[in-house]
């Protein structure tokens, strides 16, 4: 703990069970709980506004955490490798999911991305093998490279029309993917980058009403064998 009591900056590595962060703390510092392998739950007060880079990286026994609405910044690598974490609710106070934040959270089955988020950083959910579906809200504008790469249980993706920038191949090696839901009335070339490498004969593309023929005639989307209006 810092001298002014505002920042948690470290934790004993052998600490077990639940951690209750005192009210009045505003910052969980960089790598504060890094590789605290035996912590199972963490309670964060609504005085906290920032979770620093790598704050809970490698907390492999962490199963539950509630991020309060006071938090506006979740730093890169914050929950990297928290392999026992099964679900996470990101508060609407957060506008950006940083790079590598939930990478290799292999037990994560669901994530609630709020309508406040504008950007999902690179590798944010890479290797989350338990994640089965993702609904990206109609506010996200940018998706970083390899964001969902290697999410081998992911079966469904909902892509909003708000997205205007996609880097790398965010859905590479999503080998169980069966459905892609698009909201754009006009086919967007930028999604070619997003779905690079997918077996398009095994994925059903869902598009808005009265647009299927347009998608079937598009130089990229015509590779999908099944295009259905919804």
Image (cartoon, rainbow, N blue to C red):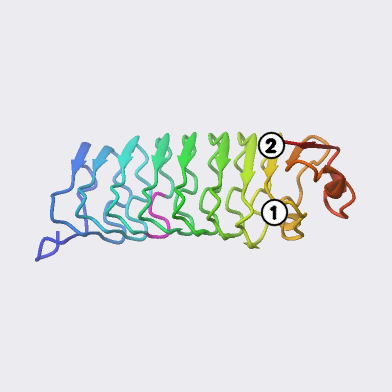
Of the two numbered discs 1 and 2 on the same chain, state the one appearing first in sequence: 2
Secondary structure beneath disc 1? helix
Residue 132 in the image: state x and y as whole percent.
57, 34
Which residue appears at 86% of the width and 53% of the height? Answer: 218
- Residue at the far bottom in the pictured view: 3
Corner quadrant of residue 141: bottom right
Can you tell which mark lies on residue 177?
2
Can you tell which mark lies on residue 45?
none
- Residue at the far front in the pictured view: 210
Quadrant in which the C terminus appears: top right
Which residue appears at 29% of the width and 46% of the height? Answer: 36
Residue 170 in the image: state x and y as whole percent.
63, 53
Whether residue 77 appears in magenta in the rendering, the answer is yes
Q: Nearer the viewer, residue 183 or 6?
A: 183
**Residue segment shown in magenta:** 74-79
- Residue 16 in sight from this viewpoint: no
Q: Nearer the viewer, residue 97 or 136?
A: 136
Q: Which residue is mark 1?
A: 194
Which residue appears at 79% of the width and 34% of the height? Answer: 202
Q: Are marks 1 and 2 in contact (CB under 8 Å)?
A: no
């Amino acid at each position: 703990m810092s001298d002014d009591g505002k920042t948690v900056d470290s934790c004993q590595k052998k600490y077990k069970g639940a951690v209750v962060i005192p009210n009045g703390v505003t910052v969980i510092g960089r790598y504060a709980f890094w590789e605290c392998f035996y912590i199972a739950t963490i309670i964060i007060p609504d005085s906290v506004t920032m979770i620093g880079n790598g704050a809970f990286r490698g907390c492999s026994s962490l199963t539950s955490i509630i991020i309060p609405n006071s938090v506006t910044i979740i730093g890169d690598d914050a929950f990297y490798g928290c392999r026992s974490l099964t679900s996470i609710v990101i508060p609407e106070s957060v506008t950006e999911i940083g790079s590598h934040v939930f990478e290799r959270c292999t037990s994560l089955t669901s994530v609630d991305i709020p309508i406040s988020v504008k950007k999902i950083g690179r590798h944010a959910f890479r290797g989350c093998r338990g994640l089965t579906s993702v609904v990206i809200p109609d506010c996200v504008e940018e998706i970083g490279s390899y964001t969902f790469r290697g999410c081998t249980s992911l079966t469904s993706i909902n892509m909003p029309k708000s997205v205007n920038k996609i880097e790398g191949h965010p859905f590479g090696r999503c080998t169980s993917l069966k459905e892609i839901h698009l909201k754009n009335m006009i086919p967007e070339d930028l999604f070619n980058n997003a779905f690079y490498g997918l077996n398009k004969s095994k994925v059903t593309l869902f598009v808005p009403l009265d647009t299927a023929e347009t998608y079937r005639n598009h130089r990229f989307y015509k590779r999908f064998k099944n295009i259905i209006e919804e």
